[in-house]
């Protein structure tokens, strides 16, 4: 079984881009100190944020194990984002660098598992970058919608 075809219920299947209940499902892991604050500022500024985005706040992006991202795909996510602090701005010194190394690993690994690498996105978003958060999340959702079969 590849992550392109996911079992939903006995006898039923859900393929990428055609979630059981309709809209895309995108999981976004956000660093508490920067990316989550940027997302909060985007909401407070009434910037457009996709409804398909399910945010998971983590204390540090460096704590996101690759297995969590793969599990999100296995459980039906159409896309997964990891948004970290900018290099040099991590509250835990090097967590964002660890997240970057893991993201590079995942970019090489997911095609071998039958997952389109465009379904995974890593980026840096600071607390002051609400516009960037809005832009990259909307672009990612748009990219997923256009790539869906």
Image: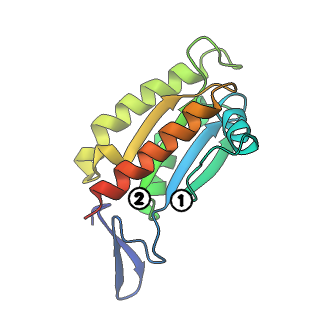
The reply, left or right, for residue 126 in relation to residue 7 is right
Q: Residue 52 bears which disc, if any?
A: 1
Residue 2 image point, x, y percent: 27, 62
Q: Which residue is mark 2?
A: 78
Vertical relation: 100 (above or below) 42:
above
Find the distance from the CA under tag 1 to the CA under tag 2. 10 Å
Quarter that holds the N terminus:
bottom left
- Determine which quarter of the picture holds residue 107: top left
The reply, left or right, for residue 45 in relation to residue 84 is right
The answer to whether one can see residue 65 in this image is no
Residue sitting at x 35%, y 88%: 11
Check whether the beta carbons of the residues at disc 1 and disc 2 lie within 8 A of each other.
Answer: yes
Task: Give the secondary structure at mark 2.
Answer: loop
In-front residue for pair 46/113:
46
Residue sitting at x 40%, y 87%: 10
Residue sitting at x 45%, y 59%: 77
Quarter that holds the C terminus:
bottom left
Vertical relation: 117 (above or below) 24:
above
The number of discs equals: 2
Looking at the image, the residue that sits furthest to the right is 44
Residue sitting at x 58%, y 28%: 125
In-front residue for pair 18/96:
18
Nearest to N terminus: mark 1 or mark 2: 1
10 Å crowding of disc 1: few (<14), some (14-19), many (20+): some
Residue 40 image point, x, y percent: 73, 40
Vertical relation: 93 (above or below) 20:
above
């Amino acid at each position: 079984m590849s992550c392109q075809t996911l079992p939903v219920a006995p006898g039923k299947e859900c393929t990428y881009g055609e979630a059981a209940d309709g809209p895309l499902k995108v999981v976004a892991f956000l660093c508490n100190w920067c990316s989550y604050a940027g997302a909060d500022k985007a909401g407070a500024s009434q910037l457009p944020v996709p409804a398909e985005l399910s945010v998971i706040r983590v204390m540090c992006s460096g704590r996101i194990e690759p297995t969590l991202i793969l599990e999100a795909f296995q459980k039906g996510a159409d896309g997964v984002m990891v948004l970290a602090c900018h290099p040099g701005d991590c509250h835990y010194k090097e967590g964002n660098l660890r997240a970057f190394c893991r993201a590079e690993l995942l970019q090489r690994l997911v095609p071998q598992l039958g997952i389109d690498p465009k379904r995974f996105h890593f980026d840096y978003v600071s607390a002051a970058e609400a516009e960037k958060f809005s832009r990259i999340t909307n672009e990612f959702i748009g990219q997923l919608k256009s790539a869906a079969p």
